[in-house]
Image (cartoon, grey):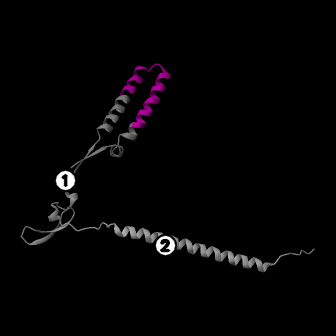
Amino acid sequence: MSMKMNGNYNDFRTNYTEHLKAEQSLARVERAEEKDKVQKDSKVSDKIPVPCDEYTSSEKSGVKPSGLYQLGQNEDGSRKIVLDDPKKSEEKCVGNTDKVDREIEKLKEKQQWLEQQIQAVAGDEQKVRELEKKLAQVEAELRQKDNDTYRRQNSEFFIFR
């Protein structure tokens, strides 16, 4: 079986080439228009003064700079370079574990109360088992919370300056 194709492919190439040329010229025109627009915008911005950074001496401004090196004197009276460190201001950090301590104290009181209840209800096996379950839970929670790691993690810290 053979197949015959009708058509002239030379026309296709010409049309494709013309199509590419048209796209390229359109792109050039768009770029030129964009360039003109940017130039117009720059002409407007040339008229507006651009703010610039300006050095102002700390002596003239009246504000003492922080975190800067300055010339100073040591005990002998000789010159030395001193850093004015802004972080050097006095800070006290205080940790508070009162909340955690109250929580642990409540658990210890609950543990004692449950132990007393178990002794008081010694005859009733079902109530004893229920109370022993509760006691085991309280003891597990106490083991988890009554240590330095838990206290540190749940402490409140206050910084005084």
Q: Earlier in the sequence, mark 1 or mark 2?
A: 2
In depth, the one of 51 and 146 nearer the eye is 51
Amino acid type indicated by mark 2 = Lys
- In the image, residue 100 lies at what x, y percent? 33, 38
The residue pinned by badge 2 equals 35
Q: Foreground mark, 1 or 2?
A: 2
Q: What's the residue at 15%, 64% (across, down)? A: 60
- In the image, residue 64 lies at what x, y percent? 16, 61
The residue pinned by badge 1 equals 90
Indicate left or right for 3 with 156 as reference: right
Secondary element at tag 1: loop
| Extent of the magenta region | 112-141
State the quadrant of the N terminus: bottom right
Does residue 126 lie above or below 51 as drawn? above
- In the image, residue 156 lies at what x, y percent? 30, 43
- In the image, residue 144 lies at what x, y percent? 40, 41
